[in-house]
Structure formats: C-alpha cells, structure tokens
Amino acid sequence: VAGEVARLDGLLDWYAPRRGAYPWRRPNPDPYAVLVSEVMLQQTQAARVVPAFESFMARFPTVEALAGAPAAAVLRQWSGLGYNRRAVALSRAARAIARNHGGQVPRDPGALASLPGVGPYTASAVASFAYGSGVPAIDTNVRRILARVFHGLEPAEVPAGDVRLTAEEAVDRTDPGAWNQALMDLGREVCRARPRCQACPVAKGCWSAGMLSDPAARARPRQPPFEGSLRQVRGAVIRELAAAGDQSVRSLVRRTGHVADRIAFAVAALSAEGMVEADPAALDGRVEGRVRLAESG
Ligand code: ADE
C-alpha cells in the first residue's frame, strides 16, 4: 500500500470546515469528554448524541464527578440514549480511571481498552482524538471507505486484517485525530452504503469511485486500465494465469493492460488469500517477479 496513501488526498481539506461540527471536537479536547462522547457514539447517531453529551458533561464535568456518583444517578442522566449498559460501564470506567490512573484518562490504547465498555475501536478513537496517537480508529464506516478506496471491494469482501494494515499505513501522522474523524464524517455524509461519489473529495483516488453509484459504469464491458476496479484486475490476473500459466508481473501488465502497481496490488491480495503464489520480487511490485496459480487450496 506504500505510495497509495495519496488516494486520500483532499480528505483533510474537506474536513476543515467540519472540525468544529460537534462539541467534543475542541482544539485541545478534554480526554474525559472524548471518552464520554465516544461511548455515547458507539450506538447512537451523532446528531442525537450532541444534546445528551452536553447535559451529561454539565452534570458530571470530570472523571471524579462521575466516579463519585451512584450508578443510578448516571443511568438517570443517560436515559433517552438507550443501550443503558454503556452508562454502567462508563461509570465503572470512571472509577477505574480515578483509582488506577490518578484520575487521568490513559493515553495508551492498551490501557484504554482494558477499561469497562471500551473496545478496540473506542480505545483507538480516544487515543487519537484526545492524545494525537497515530493509530487508526476503524469502525464500520471507516472499514467501508478503506475497502472501497484501497481494495476496490465492499467491506465484506476484504479480510478485516487487510483493512487494518491498510488503515495503519494510511493514517495521517501529523493529525491522526482529524484524520480519523474526517473518515467518520465521510462515511456518514458521502461514502454511505449507497455512496455519493459525485460529492466525494477522494473520488479521484478511489478504486471504486463511480462503480457503485453508477450502474452504467459497472455494466460497461471494457474499462480503461486506470479505471478498472481491483476486482476486475484480480479477475484479469487469474484469467491470464489460467490461460497462459506461470508468468512475470511484466507479462501480466502486457496481457491485461493494467499498470504494474495495480497488478502488484492485486497479486499481493490474491497471494494473501492463497489464490496465487508469488515470488518475493512480485510481492515487492518488481516486474520481473513471477506469479502462478496456487496448486493447493
Ligand atoms: N462517530 C464516532 N466518533 C465520532 C466523532 N468523533 N465525530 C463524529 N462522529 C463520530
């Protein structure tokens, strides 16, 4: 995926006017406020979280305030948001933070994930939004975007581990919190289950752009090489290997008409899935590397 990060160029510019869209997005956010908002956002839409977040923070403005409150008071304040177990977990998390972390929300994703009600997604979200850690925060929206942009596939078609590797490479190291939240906004507003590719700031670099929203594009029999989806490149690689046997990446480029970096990307994906066997050189994207259909599996 190296060099592929440019596929998301334009994302942070698109996000800039959205930086202040929610009360939990402050320039130097209070990590406790970020934790509260992320637990609320786990199962409730952002627009509904806004008023609940503001009244919750007014009632329990600090870790200590929350840790010192009876669970029943926290539940009463939570009511309306639903999924009430989150309130109980948040109350326990506040006590654990007060007791074990000196009242400071931990910054380490591992320590965060050991708090009640904080899973890997919420841990990464808090670490990046509150502390600027360069970790991706992968929720279903983000998984969908990355699968489409980098793999040319829908999320169910890409192994979760592949999406994670892609996300780790793609995350912006200068402002990971903005990066992660930008992807969330993009998933909510643009790259929805039924995407709005015409409005998308990263359509230019997306393997899937136009394919999903424009049925005519999908039905078109021949795509120019640069516009083929990764699915098509993968199909072409398998077809040529089946027809002509072992060959180099160079030969696959010539026979399929797709450029080398796309062939190499497809070969790496097919190799990870056990569909083809590839020399290390081919996996490195070198045109002399050889590729064959896997004999087993
Ligand atoms: N969904 C989850 N976390 C979010 C955030 N920080 N901003 C907007 N939507 C979100």
Image (tube, helix red, strand yellow):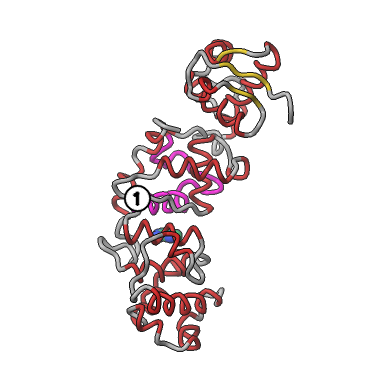
Q: Is residue 148 above or below residue 175?
A: above
Quadrant hosting ligand 1: bottom left
Query: Mark 1 CB in 8 Å range of ligand 1?
Result: no
Q: Could you say where residue 147 lies in the image, as x and y percent from the top left?
A: 53, 41
Q: Is residue 279 above or below residue 23?
A: above
Residue 129 lies in the magenta-colored region: no
SS for dot 1: helix
Residue highlighted by disc 1: 176
Residue placed furthest toward the right: 296
Residue 202 lies in the magenta-colored region: yes
Q: Residues within 10 Å of mark 1 (few under 14, many from 20)?
A: many
Q: Could you say where residue 254 lies in the image, as x and y percent from the top left?
A: 54, 10
Quadrant occupied by the N terminus: top left
How many numbered discs?
A: 1
Q: Could you say where residue 5 lies in the image, as x and y percent from the top left?
A: 39, 36
Q: Could you say where residue 42 lies in the image, as x and y percent from the top left?
A: 50, 64
Q: Is residue 113 left or right of residue 57?
A: right
Magenta part mainly helix, strand or loop?
helix
Q: Is residue 82 above or below residue 6?
A: below
Q: Is residue 58 left or right of residue 220?
A: left
Residue placed furthest toward the left: 27
Q: Which segment is the magenta one? A: 176-203
Residue type for callout 1: Pro
Q: Is residue 197 left or right of residue 9?
A: right
- Residue drawn at the location 58% of the way across and 19% of the way down: 222
